[in-house]
């Protein structure tokens, strides 16, 4: 962006930020609301064997669509593409709220409908996440971007606090369907604000969508997620179904690599990974997604079952985690803007996050709420060091013309890490629970009884059986955090090899960029 463009755009940036932050709230708030409402949803539609799929479908939709949204923004302009993503998300939200209500089918089909519509929601959310980061990248040069991305991390943390609180209130006092309907007025506000205030420079580019690459990437990622979801639980690891999915994933990704090398406008430019910092920070984002989504989705389950908290109180119990992440994100963002240095933060963040997960792996049926809150503060501090620093490093590693693709790739790897993490941790949780005495205590069904457990029936169990089931749940959840440590400890190791490249102080296109200015900002 030239200095003239910046002079036009910058006076409105605070107003634009309100719209962008509202849109960011959509994706983050929804996921947190649903996490708190999940036990009630599962209680109405099915057992714990459906627990992770409601989340997995959303994350999978986000993951496969993120690189596509990023590239579409590069080609067609970020504003129309971003507004389209908001509309898709809102349509998905409305459909999720109507699942199993009689409008689209009866309660028997409710879980299948909800999972399908959560995927639609995820498709829109992929555009929201990458769009916000890419638009900030258009408006603000990297040297100043840390402050604004720190603010975005703060909004994400606030959403993570407000989500469980709103979700808990809705679950306790209204229908769980309002966990989805609440997105509609918020999305409407975001649309109005962005249509009125977001003005970006137009550039003329060749519009060549890499549809083959998009399709192959979607097939490969979906197959991998299904492998981690079904392997060892629905099907044996050496079953024809799992081996077939392995074959599909390998072939799809190999052909994807072949297609991307020859595509005029690749969805995920492989040349980006020749950049050392970009490759390293992409791996860091992948591992961050593992840890973050694991914590966000299993902590409410622990609080509502083992600690006996209501849905609303489980949201309040997540406040320490969000507070740690909010404070550190804001401080780190300002520090990067002031000093221009950033390499140390992902290293420290990886170490602290690993310590937090180790502490959470100590949770058991007797852990007090004060103790678990202290553990969550440590995890939140570690995540605060990492959340926006990883995006900043990714964007600073590429030319301005590839900003959307780079933002999409960085968000993609965090999302795919979350998708794999939810699927893998869900399988670990289910297998650990099925192998415990909790299955026998719950209806004598062994592993199947534990997997199909209805959380609403816990209070109806005899005291001794209930204690046994809660012990099995606590053990399975702590086991998930222990596995997460194995991935988190790799973050500081990878971050150590990141080079401290000076942050750019301008968004002027480099001479190699084939961008031709076309008129005034729209």
Image: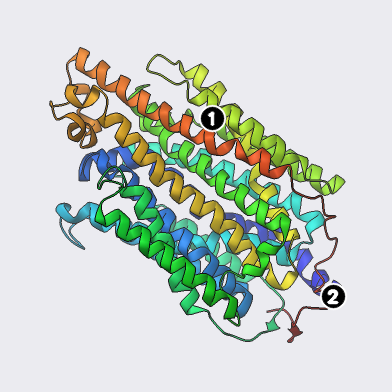
**Residue visible at 44% across and 71% down in the picture:** 216
On residue 315, which mark appears? none
**Residue visible at 69% across and 73% down in the picture:** 200
Calculate the distance from the C-alpha at mark 1 to the C-alpha at mark 2.
Answer: 48 Å
Judge whether 156 appears above or below 302 on screen: below
Measuring from the top left, give residue 465's x and y in whole percent: 20, 17
- The residue where tag 2 is placed is 4
The image quarter containing residue 67 is bottom right
Mark 1 or mark 2, which has the lower sequence index? 2
Q: Please tell me whether mark 2 sits on a helix, a strand or a loop.
A: helix
- Is 124 or 188 nearer to us in this picture? 124
**Whether residue 492 can be seen here:** yes
In this view, the residue farthest toward the left is 444
On residue 357, which mark appears? 1
- For the N terminus, give its image quadrant: bottom right
**Residue visible at 17% across and 60% down in the picture:** 105
**Whether residue 19 can be seen here:** no
Measuring from the top left, give residue 98's x and y in whole percent: 27, 58
Q: Residues within 10 Å of mark 2 (few under 14, many from 20)?
A: few
Q: Residues within 10 Å of mark 1 (few under 14, many from 20)?
A: many
- Is 107 or 312 nearer to us in this picture? 107
- Is 310 or 487 nearer to us in this picture? 487
Judge whether 461 appears above or below 243 on screen: above
Measuring from the top left, give residue 270's x and y in whole percent: 62, 68
């Amino acid at each position: 962006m030239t200095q003239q463009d910046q002079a036009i755009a910058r006076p409105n940036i605070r107003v634009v930020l309100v719209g962008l932050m509202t849109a960011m709230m959509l994706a983050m708030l929804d996921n947190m609301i649903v996490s708190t409402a999940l036990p009630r949803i599962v209680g109405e539609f099915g057992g714990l064997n459906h627990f992770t799929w409601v989340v997995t479908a959303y994350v999978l939709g986000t993951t496969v669509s993120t690189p596509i949204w990023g590239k579409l923004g590069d080609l067609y302009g970020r504003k129309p593409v971003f507004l389209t993503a908001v509309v898709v998300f809102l349509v998905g939200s409305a459909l999720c709220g109507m699942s199993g209500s009689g409008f689209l089918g009866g309660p028997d089909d409710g879980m299948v409908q909800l999972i399908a519509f959560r995927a639609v929601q995820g498709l829109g959310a992929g555009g929201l996440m990458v769009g916000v980061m890419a638009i900030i990248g258009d408006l603000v040069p990297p040297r100043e971007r840390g402050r604004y991305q720190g603010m975005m991390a703060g909004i994400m943390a606030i959403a993570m606090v407000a989500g469980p609180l709103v979700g808990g209130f809705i679950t306790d006092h209204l229908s769980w369907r309002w966990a989805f309907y609440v997105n509609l007025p918020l999305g409407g506000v975001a649309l109005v604000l962005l249509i009125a205030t977001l003005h970006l420079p137009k550039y003329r580019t060749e519009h060549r969508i890499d549809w083959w690459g998009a399709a192959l990437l979607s097939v490969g990622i979906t197959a991998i997620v299904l492998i981690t979801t079904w392997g060892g639980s629905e099907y044996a690891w050496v079953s024809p179904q799992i081996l077939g999915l392995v074959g599909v994933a390998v072939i799809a990704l190999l052909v994807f690599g072949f297609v991307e090398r020859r595509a005029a406008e690749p969805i995920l430019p492989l040349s980006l990974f020749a950049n050392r910092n970009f490759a390293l920070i992409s791996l860091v984002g992948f591992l961050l997604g593992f840890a973050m989504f694991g914590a966000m989705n299993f902590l409410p389950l622990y609080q509502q079952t083992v600690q006996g908290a209501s849905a609303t109180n489980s949201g309040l119990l997540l406040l320490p985690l969000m507070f740690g992440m909010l404070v550190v994100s804001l401080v780190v963002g300002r520090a990067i803007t002031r000093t221009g240095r950033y390499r140390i933060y992902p290293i420290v963040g990886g170490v602290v996050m690993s310590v937090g997960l180790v502490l959470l792996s100590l949770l058991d049926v007797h852990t007090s709420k004060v103790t678990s809150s202290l553990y969550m503060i440590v995890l939140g501090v570690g995540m605060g060091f990492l959340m926006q620093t990883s995006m900043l490093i990714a964007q600073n590693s590429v030319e301005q013309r590839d900003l959307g693709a780079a933002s999409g790739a960085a968000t993609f790897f965090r999302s795919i890490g979350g998708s794999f993490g939810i699927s893998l941790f869900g399988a670990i949780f289910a297998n650990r629970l099925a192998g415990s005495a909790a299955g026998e205590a719950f209806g004598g069904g062994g592993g199947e009884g534990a997997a199909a457990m209805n959380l609403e029936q816990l209070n109806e169990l005899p005291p001794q059986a209930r204690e046994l089931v809660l012990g099995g749940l606590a053990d399975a959840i702590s086991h998930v955090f222990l596995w997460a440590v194995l991935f988190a400890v790799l973050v500081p190791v990878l971050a150590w090899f990141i080079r401290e490249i000076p942050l750019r102080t301008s968004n002027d296109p480099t001479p190699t960029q084939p961008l031709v200015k076309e008129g005034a900002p729209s």
